[in-house]
Amino acid sequence: MAFEMLISSILLWFGIYSILSLSLNIEYGYGGIPNFGKALAVLIGAFTTGAIINRILIAIYHVQWESITQASGFMKSQVDAVIASNPLYGLALLLISLIVAALIGAAIGSLFILPSAKLESDYLAITLLAIAEIAFMIAYYDTNIVGGYYGVPVPNVAAFIPGEYREFFFVGLVLFLALITYLFLERVLNSPYGRVLRAMREDSTALQFFGKDIMRLRIKTMAFSTSIASMTGVLYSYYAGNVVGIVSLFARVNWTFFPFLMVLLGGMSNNRGVLAGVLTFVVIWRLINGYKHHITALLNLPFDVNWLQYIIFGALMIIILYYKPEGIISEKPIETDPIKELKSKKT
């Protein structure tokens, strides 16, 4: 793998996983909601792009079709030609897709938690995982939604950029959105809302005693975080040019287990720690993928080198939980403005 492509790959996945892991940190790190169905949020973004936006464009361009996969291919060629001559069309399409995905994500996130909002954490985690798995199996085997295992092609929103530079466009885009997400969440989670989430994580019974509706708070938190996470599905779909990369049998690993590992590695309830965890994970992951043939020749592994990353990351999670559960950057105590003023007076 060329060094430039390796760096580009690291930056791209750092941006995508930063958005996803920061959204998980809202639920799990701050709110204590073990959302083992995180992959569903990414699937919502893929559905928005491949099932909703594609069908709208197919209707606009009057494409006759028997299957969504075939029709999307014809539509893509027409839309790409328009975007190539009118960049604003591609940027508008991307923006609309992100907004629609966020709105649908908020709505489904609210409904997603309803059947299990009153459950204890262990049962809640399993219930959320089951709901996500059911949704993925339907998406993977029903070819009428987003093409199933064939997937559906989506328009190239960067068709106005020469082919060799499109990778850099998406790298810049995801890094920009990751930065905006980080700054926004830093503001939100250091507000009273963030402090209520921490209180719910530490002792939901005590929080109820003070008059807070735990079920309502969980619903709001899931809606908020799912709306953010769904954007990663849109971004990856447009980057890959097809939604089949999301609707896959290993979705639970890539879009649920990996983000949990990043949050635990970096430090829960700490956005800077999450970014540190994402960067550490992505560098290891892309190095293994980029140099897997060299690793195979060097170590003479008795199994496929593709499984090496899962072994390493599984062992890494066990080590983190056992030896450093606070992560790379530990959670800092809450300091409100009055507390800061009091400390400054004492010094």
Image (cartoon, rainbow, N blue to C red):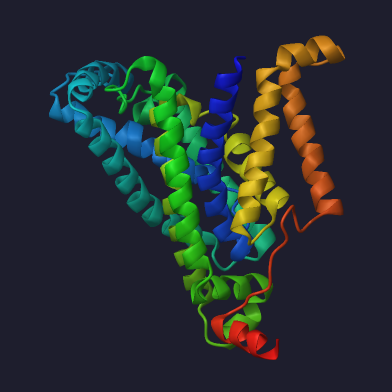
Locate residue 179, reporting x and y percent: 47, 49
Picture quarter with the N terminus: top right
The residue sitting at the front extreme is: 347
Specify whether residue 241 is in view.
Answer: no
Specify whether residue 235 is in view.
Answer: yes
Locate residue 124, reporting x and y percent: 62, 59
Q: Which residue is drawn at 22% across and 29% down?
A: 87
Q: How many labels does the image show?
A: 0
Nearer to me, 318 or 270: 270
Locate residue 192, reporting x and y percent: 51, 77
Locate residue 200, reporting x and y percent: 61, 73
Q: Residue at x 80, y 52 (%)?
A: 321
To which quarter of the image does residue 161 belong? Answer: top left
- Residue 126 position (above or below residue 251): below
Nearer to me, 185 or 176: 176
To which quarter of the image does residue 88 belong? Answer: top left
Picture quarter with the C terminus: bottom right
Nearer to me, 79 or 280: 280
Q: Is residue 158 left or right of residue 187?
A: left
Q: Is residue 301 left or right of residue 226?
A: right
- Residue 240 position (above or below residue 127): above
Q: Which residue is drawn at 26% across and 42% down?
A: 96
- Residue 18 position (above or below residue 88): below
